[in-house]
Amino acid sequence: MTERRKTTLWQLLGFACLPVAALWVSVEIVLSICWLPSPQAGVPPAFAVVVKPHPYRVYAYKSGRTEKAGDGVYNSVGFRDREFAEQKPPHTIRIICLGGSTTYSLGATSNSVTYPAYLQRFLRQRYAGAPFDIEVINAGHPVYSSLEPLILFQTRVLDFSPDVAILMTGVNDLWEALKYATFSSDYSHSRHTLGPLRPAVWEHSRLLSLLLARATSPFNPYRPNPDRNLVHLTHQPWYDTAPSHTLTIPLREAKCAETVGRNALSFVAVARGNNVIPVIATETFGPQYEVFAEALERSNETLRTIASSQSVVLVDVARAMPWNAEQYFDAVHLRDGSETYGRMGKLFADALAKAGVIEQAARNLNRGASVH
Amino acid sequence: MVEQVPAMRRRRRWPLIFPAIAAGWLLAEIVIAAIGAWVSPAPLAALRRVYRPHPYRVYALIPGSRSKAGHFTINSQGFRGPEIEPCKPSGTVRIACLGDSTTFGEAATADDHTWPARLERRLRERYVKPGGQLSGIEVINAGVPGYTSLESLIHFETWVLDYQPDIAIFDHGLNDAVFMACFRDFSSEYTHARKVFEIPRPQLWEHSLLLSSLFPARRTIANPYWSDRRPSQAEWLDRLTLTDPQRPAVDEAEQRHCFRPERIAVFARNVRNFVFVARGQGVVPVLATVVYAPQAGFFADVVGQINESLRKVATELSVPCVDLAREMPWSAEAFVDASQPRDGPEGLERAGRIFADELIRQKLVERAAAGKPAAGNQR
């Protein structure tokens, strides 16, 4: 007869760990064999074809690439536009349009039907007999807030000797202000440079990714998210709904408007310092998203104040083209067509002509020519 | 029967192997940590403690961090030195100093030894008196090691401006010279030299001291405990933020081959834009030249040309200029290396005095206190 010894806690622990670990490994192996989605590391291929990380402005378009759908074609500078000479041709007024997706003209099905393309067409028609040519360049990048166009303007656009620079901004700054619990005016709380997607540690497990599907981030390597877009690729994870601290929303709106105002003021100062005529434009937001629409109106109001105090030409898109379901395909972006982007191009052309911007640019051009 | 007992005991005990291994492992980790306490964390780990990636200016100082040796502390706003109120107190003149490692004070052994701290002391001695017009003078050290004129411009317009400085000093040229003289390609947005700051992450197993010490050959450069090659923090910064980290070390012949004088126009453009932004935001800009050891040969010539372009911008735009390169020429007594002033009366103390004297001579503090723009700001 042998004496039966009592099982200790350590032994129980050992007995429990072994099968659990073995089971886990087996399930992971089975899932890796049977579960078809393969891991995706880095930037999804569809984006990797056209965009690249940029150390100073989050991302930039690769030169000479075409979007998969064929609607966006990027020139050698990385702008959604035709090729243009870096050195401005003589007797040419060069207008640069800076901003986010509204300037880029998301929804326009080709480069020739964006708002800057329409603006060029209308201005050329209007100044057909003038002794100068007019060239409009689309330097808009989706997701760019008021910060990136300022940096793009200072570091690259000035190389192209623009005569007029239009900044249309406000919408993308709302995301930084309203989707995060904290706010930093350099947007380091929300933005990150376009880079490899970083899943949480537990998301490297196929089993956990399967079991906790609802908790996976957009960066989960095993559950490719078809809706993942440039916003995901350039932002820290955000709240799906606006932060519940409703009391802070007015504060967030104020900070957002302050930041947009600060950046717009810097843009005006840099433009004038470099003999470029600055033009500021407001943006529109669908009223169905009340918090966003109100916050944007506050930023728009700041832009109007700056335009007034600095004697800068303002194109008030928010008032001239209020949101309606026929013209906008979402809260912000116009549908493709002459009634939408064409109308916006005309709005800008009329505003520039009415304010005498082209005439002033022509005078500057002549002054420059006589100096040289 | 007699032989079965040990066999059964063995069978009963085998599950103990897991807890035993876990306990043994833990013990080994503790022992190695205790024995290896003298092993300082690898430079990359030290770097990670102080720097973080930044979406607009490549990298930034981590608020609230400090060097292991305690030489410097970063306040909650990301500036070297003591905390400052986000909202400027009334009656206070605030001066922001933008620059690279010389402004940050890499050679300063304490936060109050940097030239901005010494500048603050001298200005306070002069202006802050009981019953006087000014209740305080604050100098913000917004220098970040490795920054060029472009990063400081972005730093200024996206962050420093929020602290309502009255005067902003812009002290740059050394790192711009590296970008201009050491790289064959050149881009006006400095992307020929700068890349996105990505701190390599150690592999999961490398977090274990035991495994890291057992498998030295498998350790990556991101290992938090050991680094096979031990570059300095500055070299690590180069490695993580430059497209080709070897380029700053190229010889003089290669520098001559790479450098084109027209590249300096980009530096001048950044300086001009700083002046425009400052004035547009109601801040008085002040420019400063940089010092470099003349025996550096061609590179010192490039720095000289950069200084000359800065002087031209200062004259053209009527901006006060602190000509440190002329006021404080390089000497072995005053500098620890080719560009860093020594922590002492001949080095950082003297630099602080030169800045203070120029600000006093130009009456910039009085004007800021009275709310009057400086001469060039009247536009």
Image (spheres, coloured by chain):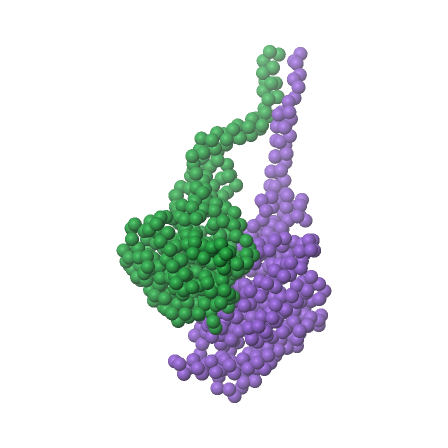
Q: Residue at x 56, y 70 (%)?
A: A167
- Residue lying at the far bottom in this picture: please name it: A129
Q: Position of residue A77 (x, y in %)?
A: 48, 68
Quarter of the image where the N terminus of chain B is located? top right
Q: Residue at x 69, y 70 (%)?
A: A323
From the viewer's side, name the closer residue of B7 and A209.
A209
Q: Residue at x 44, y 70 (%)?
A: B376
From the viewer's side, name the closer residue of A273 and B228.
A273
Q: Give above or below for A370 relative to B302.
A: below
Q: Position of residue B166 (x, y in %)?
A: 49, 62
| Chain painted green | B
Q: Judge whether residue B191 can be spotted in this image.
A: no
Q: Judge whether residue A5 can be spotted in this image.
A: yes
Q: Residue at x 59, y 77 (%)?
A: A348
Q: Position of residue B253 (x, y in %)?
A: 28, 59
Q: Position of residue B347 (x, y in %)?
A: 35, 51
From the viewer's side, name the closer residue of A183 and B88.
B88
Chain A colour is purple
Q: Give above or below for A258 relative to A91.
A: above
Count all numbered tags in the image, as a single digit: 0
Q: Give above or below for B353 relative to B260.
A: above
